[in-house]
């Protein structure tokens, strides 16, 4: 229960930070819609969806606060289509950790598409392991067993991320990123 309270406090802090910025809300809502619809369209392929790649690209080009807001709302809104549960807050936390990794590696990732794809591969595992925490907390499952059982899904998520990052990067930049000057 304490974990959920901490996650909600983090979410409130991100929303408060977002309120005080001049981030392009129209662009973010378009990316949010793509992430939610993309997650729904690929539901037949377990753990393969463009949402993580879109969040990573948002972090790379629009910064922490924008990507963190998407990390919060993608699982909530896609949960309305796919099902809500206690895992939604852990999905937010997992994507928030992925966003933090991208922000920390931003200078390197902007110059190497292959490194970005490799980080996308790792993001599949980071997200999956964080989501596993919800099952460990809610039903008391053994976390190590969850890691082993989720391995094929985390691999699929990671490979999907890498492929989506390679395929979507240039299109994302061309459509959403406005380089003035």
Image (spheres, rainbow, N blue to C red):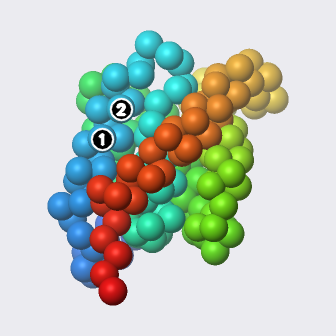
Q: Nearer the viewer, residue 30 or 138?
A: 30
Q: Nearer the viewer, residue 80 or 125?
A: 125
Quarter of the image holding residue 84?
Answer: top left
Quarter of the image holding residue 16?
Answer: bottom left
Q: Nearer the viewer, residue 66 or 167?
A: 167
Measured along the vertical axis of the image, is residue 7 above or below residue 109? above
- Residue at numbered disc 1: 34
Residue located at (47% from left, 56% from top): 57
In the image: residue 7, left or right of residue 103: left
- Other-residue count near label 1 (Cα within 10 Å), few / some / many at <14 / 14–19 / ≥20: some
Residue located at (71% from left, 47% from top): 118
Residue 38 - label: 2
Q: Is residue 2 visible?
A: no
- Please say if the residues under marks 1 and 2 sit with CB atoms less than 8 Å apart: yes
Q: Return the x and y of residue 76 as percentages of the image width and height.
A: 33, 40
Question: In the displayed image of the protein, which residue is found farthest to the bottom?
Answer: 181
Q: Nearer the viewer, residue 59 or 1?
A: 59
Q: Return the x and y of residue 62 as percentages of the image width and height.
A: 40, 69
């Amino acid at each position: 229960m304490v974990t959920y309270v901490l996650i909600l406090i983090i979410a409130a802090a991100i929303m408060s930070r977002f309120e005080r910025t001049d981030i392009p809300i129209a662009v973010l809502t378009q990316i949010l819609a793509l992430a939610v619809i993309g997650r729904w369209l690929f539901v037949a392929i377990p753990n393969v969806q463009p949402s993580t790649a879109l969040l990573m690209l948002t972090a790379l080009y629009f910064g922490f606060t924008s990507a963190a807001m998407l990390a919060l709302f993608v699982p909530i809104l896609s949960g309305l289509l796919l099902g809500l549960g206690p895992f939604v807050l852990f999905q937010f936390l997992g994507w928030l950790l992925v966003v933090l990794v991208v922000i920390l590696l931003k200078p390197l990732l902007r110059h190497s598409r292959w490194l970005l794809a490799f980080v996308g591969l790792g993001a599949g595992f980071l997200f999956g392991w964080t989501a596993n925490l919800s099952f460990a907390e809610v039903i008391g499952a053994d976390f190590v067993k969850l890691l082993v059982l989720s391995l094929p899904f985390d691999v699929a998520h990671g490979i999907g991320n890498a492929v989506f990052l390679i395929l979507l990067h240039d299109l994302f930049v061309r459509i959403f990123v406005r380089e003035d000057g």
